[in-house]
Amino acid sequence: QVQLVQSGGGLVQPGGSLRLSCLVSGLTFSSYDMGWFRQAPGKERETVATIVWNRGSTYYADPVKGRFIISRDNAKKSVYLQMNSLKPEDTAVYYCAAEFPGSQHKYWGQGTQVTVSS
């Protein structure tokens, strides 16, 4: 059974930082591309950042470039999202996901709320 269990998130003031974690089980973690996605109220889910299974190449959506960092630890079967210089527009439910390269199918975490507000 594949499970993606997220932790982190919460309420932070503008300019603050948060770190999200996603612990994966039930699949060969090192063979999967990993990503973070978010969905704000009334909006569609969007890609935040991704990291591929080999070499760790990363992609960032324009709104988060230079502020967020995605990383993975294959030994710990975990992926992380370090979020710095947070803005109110970063407020959303954040999801981690795992996708086998080329499969077009994602396994999803349970989601975690991030609220940026003073």
Image (tube, rainbow, N blue to C red):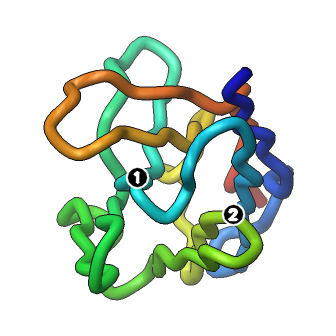
x 57%, y 37%: residue: 95
Residue at far front of view:
28
Say which mark, if any, is on residue 90: none
Q: Nearer the viewer, residue 78 or 110?
A: 78
Distance between the Cα atoms at labels 2 and 1?
A: 10 Å
Q: Is residue 71 above or below residue 63?
A: below
Residue 2 in percent (x, y) is at 67, 27
Left or right? Give the position of 18 relative to 41.
right
Say which mark, if any, is on residue 77: 2
x 62%, y 33%: residue: 93
Q: On the image, which quarter does residue 8 sit in?
A: bottom right
Q: On the image, which quarter does residue 56 sit in?
A: bottom left
Q: Hey, what amino acid is under mark 1? A: Tyr
Q: Earlier in the sequence, mark 2 or mark 1?
A: 1
Residue 58 in percent (x, y) is at 27, 75
Q: Is residue 45 above or below residue 78?
A: above
Q: Hey, what amino acid is under mark 2? A: Lys
Q: On the image, which quarter does residue 34 sit in?
A: bottom left
Residue occupied by mark 1: 32
Q: Nearer the viewer, residue 2 or 64?
A: 2
**Which quadrant is home to the N terminus?**
top right
Q: Is residue 54 above or below residue 8?
A: below
Q: Rate crowding at label 1 as few (under 14), some (14 to 19) or many (20 or more) other CA atoms within 10 Å.
A: some
Q: Nearer the viewer, residue 31 or 83?
A: 31
x 18%, y 65%: residue: 62
Residue 72 in percent (x, y) is at 55, 75
Residue 26 in percent (x, y) is at 70, 36
Q: Rate crowding at label 2 as few (under 14), some (14 to 19) or many (20 or more) other CA atoms within 10 Å.
A: some
x 73%, y 31%: residue: 3
What is the secondary structure assignment of the residue under circle 1? Answer: loop
What is the secondary structure assignment of the residue under circle 2? Answer: loop
